[in-house]
Image (cartoon, grey):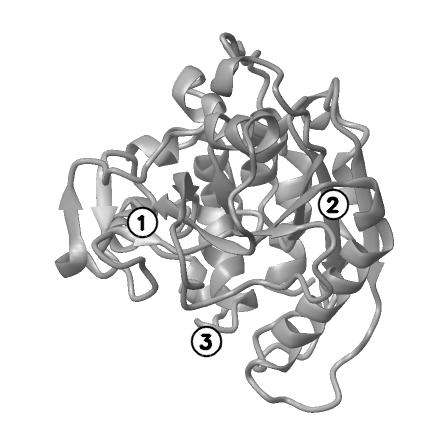
Amino acid sequence: MFLAEYTYRFIVATAGVTCSVQYNDFPLPCGGNQYNHRILFATTLTYEADTLQVVLAEYDGVADILITENLNINNPHERKQKPFYLWPQLKSMPQFATSKSVVHFKECVKSRLNRDMWEQEHINDMCLRDAILDVAHNYDVVVVGSVDEILARGTLLKLKYCSLPALPLSGAIGMPMGKLGRAFKTDWHHANREKSFSLPTVYAASYDNPVRHIPPLPGPAIVGGLHMTNYCFLPAMIIKELWSTSYGHSFSLRDAKTDLNRQKQKCYSMLSARVSEGHSAETVVPLFLAQCTAALPAWYGNVDRRETRFSNLLNK
């Protein structure tokens, strides 16, 4: 079994952390239920089971969720596919259940034609766009981004109940690069917001080409949220090396069999010259992370017992 498949199977086997999130949505913004816009969060899922649990908790009852997923791996160095679609493995687990939101799912089946670095991401974007257009007539607002580009619940409540700004607009969310309490100076930020990340993108549901946007769109930003990238959790670190276009590395089992603490510190130190202490003004920590601080300890700079187990299995 090759490393990516082994890691995917471990992620599924250990997915989901039990923790009950308490919502405090009242009083509603804008003087109460002035509007009641129907919101869809549309995303592409790759390997981020923990992040998806955070998303489902943050959006439950405020937005429905559309998940698209492809078995093709973005990294052009990887010749094999993901072993299975991730969402069908997770959806029956109680930790991934929503009580008030509907979760839509679409399998993406188009294969690569060549080994261009960005070809697979383009395929995924087009699949997501088509899936949105299939259901957009049921909604007023569509939020489009990767699963780790999370608008805060309070930000979504404003979109739901307040009068809408002129759309489309880019989000402006914080980016702590894998450890809460930090801020990263991004390449894709809004004017006067150097530590903001300009996704996800917010559209009127009638828009005919709803895809991710980098750099930010003109106009004001939809402010408040968290970019949960650079997750320093060993299985996620390995899969990102194997899967991600932006990494594009050849990565072996030998590479994975190194000291866990050293790997984690290397992850937390990524692009450290551009990381400063303290949240940016755009950072809002999702409720699951804020209320369940022991559930996903890697976000607080600590070792997750699951990654210790995974490391031990790799080094047997």
- Provide the secondary structure element on which disc 2 rests: strand
Left or right, residue 44 beside residue 309: right
Label number found at residue 159: none
Residue on which disc 3 sits: 249
Q: Where is residue 78 in the image (x, y as percent from the top left)?
A: 61, 77
Please tell me whether residue 194 is drawn above or below residue 117 in the rendered image. above
Q: Between residues 15 and 173, which one lies in front from this camera angle?
A: 173
Mark with earlier residue (3, 2): 2
Q: Which residue is drawn at 55% across and 15% down?
A: 19
- Provide the secondary structure element on which disc 3 rests: loop
Question: In the rendered image, which quarter contains the N terminus?
Answer: bottom right
Is the Cβ of the residue at disc 1 closer than 8 Å to that at disc 2? Answer: no
Residue on which disc 2 sits: 66
Please state which of the two labelled residues, at mark 3 or mark 2, is closer to the viewer.
2
Q: Is residue 281 visible?
A: yes
Q: Which residue is drawn at 45% across and 67% down?
A: 214
Label number found at residue 177: 1
Please state which of the two labelled residues, at mark 3 or mark 1, is closer to the viewer.
1
